Amino acid sequence: MVKRFSFFRPLFIRGVILLLVPLLSIQAQRIRVNPDTRMKAVFLINFTKYISWTTLDTVKNFHIGVYGLDDIMIPLRQMAKERASDGQKISVKRVETVSEIEVCDILFVPVDQTRAFHELRPDIPPENILLVGESLGFATSDGAINFIKRDGKIKLEINRKALQAANLTASSHLLKLAILVDEEDTPFRD
């Protein structure tokens, strides 16, 4: 009986290792993601609750697009799976063309993709897509919401005119957290 176990022992160990390797790589991906990137992903997922789309019914799936490649895909996909278990379906996809962007409810434009997106922007329909970026001036030029870092924290710049042009409405709770931009009568607030 001892000889029999010693024969199966290498197979058993090899099987355990094969089962653990995918789990370790998932854990490694979690570790490599910058905390600021993870916070931006949290905001993007939560926009599904704090922004109202006038054309969406309440049971529609949300489509979040990421323009180009970015590390934010890892936490976004993880959080979308968690939301699915809560009953809200969110798909996350990398997008590059206007036709791919047109099906998005939320589009995130990473800082290194801003110039390419700016050139593509005139071809994108202005309605029903929440455009979110992370570059200087994004909320006043190309989109409605911009992530900025201030005092070591991720903050939001929101352009209510851009939201209105896209037929979107931000909740008062979200607006209280934000720096409102492109409003003549609203003083800068933090």
Image: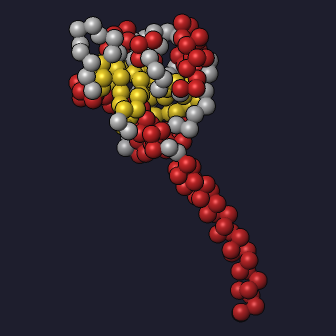
172 or 60: nearer the eye? 172
Q: Is residue 96 left or right of residue 151?
A: right
Q: Position of residue 77 (x, y in %)?
A: 51, 40
Please indicate, yes or no, whether residue 187 appears anywhere in the rendered image: yes
Q: Position of residue 57 (x, y in %)?
A: 36, 22
User: Residue drawn at (53%, 52%), measured in percent from left and top?
Assistant: 31
Is the residue 106 above or below the residue 70 in the image? above
User: Residue drawn at (73%, 80%), measured in percent from left and top?
Assistant: 8
Please indicate, yes or no, whether residue 128 appears anywhere in the rendered image: no
Q: Position of residue 71 (x, y in %)?
A: 56, 38
Colour scheme shown: secondary structure
175 or 102: nearer the eye? 175
Is the residue 15 above or below the residue 33 in the image? below
Q: Residue furthest front?
A: 151
Q: Look at the image and tell me in which quarter the N terminus lies.
A: bottom right
User: Residue drawn at (27%, 18%), measured in percent from left and top?
Assistant: 188
Q: Quadrant of residue 185?
A: top left
Q: Residue furthest bottom?
A: 1
Q: Is residue 46 left or right of residue 68?
A: left
